[in-house]
Image (cartoon, helix red, strand yellow):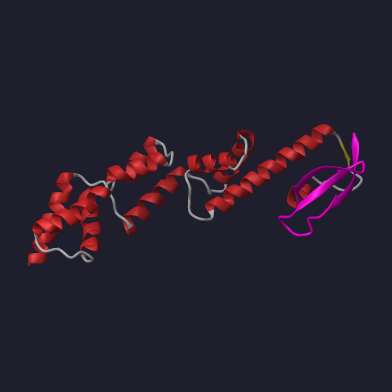
Amino acid sequence: MGKITDIRGGRQRGKRVNIYIDGQFSLAVDLEIAVKEKLKVGTDIDSDRIAEVGKQDRIHRCYDAAVRFLGYRPRSEAELRDRLHRRGFSQDDIEPAIIKLGEQGLVNDNVFAQFWTENRESFSPRSRYLTMLELRKKGVAEEVISRTIADINDEESAYRTAITRVSRLHFSDRQDLRKRLGDYLRRRGFSYETINRTIEKIWQERQE
């Protein structure tokens, strides 16, 4: 059993404080954790309590890192876990942080998959197949993917992305249009049949 003899630093929220026990530096924790755990000068503290405070601090830092990562855009749970692992957090740190984020609605693969699909449909339409592959790569479960991409219409998506692209293309004839636009649509995962129908539709509209 020891006694906290000094707490230094951490005058602002988010700052870390150094905890001294019996005159010797013992550990550094976030100020929020020090307050939550009621760490004060004069408090008796044993090795088990020190270990628990250190654990809570790691979870807190893991949670904060996850929130910062989510600040750029929504992420799938698998993406988030991978990022936190690469940041050096252990599974014991990550699991409680993920649970807390889920309870707050900050991590939800159904919401993420819907966001990803709607974002693609709005700004860069692609095929249902390619959207499926992208969501798989993000670690989203198959049943979630199936529900999310069910309403994607390849014909409509191909036409919308082709119309946007063709306005920036210079082509001399149908064959030239087919080559320039066909390559573009293939990169977005559309089938040969869908590409052919889309190009013919646009060609006819241009002629009219």
Q: Is residue 119 left or right of 97 when viewed as pictured?
A: left
Percent x, y for residue 51? 77, 35
* Along the viewing direction, whichever of 26 and 142 lies nearer the viewer: 26
115 versus 164 height, above or below = above
Magenta region, mostly helix, strand or loop? Answer: strand
Residue 195 image point, x, y percent = 17, 50
Q: In this rendering, would 49 be left or right of 125? A: right
Taking the spot 20% from the left edge, 56% from the top edge, the residue there is: 159
- Asked whether residue 193 appears in the rendered view, the answer is yes
Residue 87 picture quarter: top right
In the picture, the quarter occupied by the N terminus is top right
In which quadrant will I find the C terminus? bottom left
Task: Answer yes or no: is residue 147 visible.
Answer: no
Q: Residue at the spot x=53%, y=51% of the render?
A: 70
Residue 96 against residue 104 in the figure, above or below: above
**Residue 50, percent from left and from top:** 80, 37
Q: Position of residue 118 (x, y in %)?
A: 36, 53
Range covered by the magenta-colored residues: 1-30
Judging depth in this view, the residue of 207 and 108 nearest the camera is: 207
- Left or right: residue 124 compared with residue 183: right
Q: Residue at x 57, y 46 (%)?
A: 101
